[in-house]
Amino acid sequence: MEIQAVFFDYGGVVGRLDRQEMARLEDKYGLPPGGFWHALFEIPEWYEVEVGRGSEKGWLRAALDKLYELAGRPIPGIRQEWHHIWKGVDDDVVSLARKLRARYKVGMISNATKNLEEILENHHRIIDLFDVVINSARVGMAKPDVRIFHLAAERLGVPVSACVFTDDLIHNVEGARAAGMQAFHFQSAAHLEAELRSLGVEW
């Protein structure tokens, strides 16, 4: 089926996630490789927050405790540094999304806190790029649950098979594929452009 809609993830796709900075912080504070990601996004408190339960403060407190546990000591200075892992938006991805809007519906599907829309609107000022923003914390389900991809297609009024999705996490890509979407593992804007063109998407 001809593609009618293109969906983007936020963190790691539209929002630039600096994994080298993560690795630098892990080295600085004696954390195991991957420990930073694990402490933030692989703890029960995150899984609650991303579907709209629990509190963001509770999640951040639990993440800090997990970092202390992984380091084997208190490292309070890391709380002031971890925001450096986010480097604004990927201008090339944003530019691509703007081009696509001329011919396709454009949406976002993100596992996030309830602050996502405010960040897109008032911090990055790009919420106008998206015909719909599917925020896991507001819809009560999170990627890779196939239901969130079906919901996204439904909100845009297009068949799920007419949608393409990109995410930096492979299990979310697999979830989209299981739901019936075309989906690509995000590596760069240039790589995504090539993958989209392979599906006949033009701009």
Image (tube, rainbow, N blue to C red):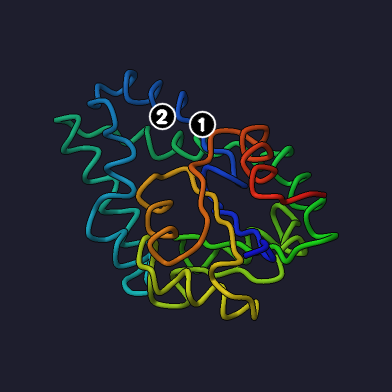
Position of the N terminus by quadrant: bottom right
How packed mark 1 is, by other alpha carbons closer than 10 Å (few <14, some 14-19, many 20 or more), is some
Residue 184 coordinates in the image, percent (x, y)? 51, 46
Residue depicted at 32% across the width and 36% down the height: 36
Q: Distance between the residues labelled 2 and 1?
A: 7 Å
Disc 2 target residue: 22
- Which quadrant of the structure image shows residue 153? bottom right
Task: Reply above or below: 75 against 47.
Answer: above
Contact? badges 2 and 1 (CB < 8 Å): yes
Q: Please state if 197 lies on the left or on the right of 27 as rendered.
A: right
Q: In the depicted view, which residue is nearer to us: 37 or 30?
A: 37
- State the SS at label 1: loop
Query: Residue 30 falls in which quadrant of the image?
Result: top left
Secondary structure type for disc 2 = helix
| Image quadrant where residue 159 sits | bottom right
Above or below, 115 relative to 25: below
Q: Which residue is the site of mark 1?
A: 18
Q: Which of 37 and 4 is in front in this view?
A: 4
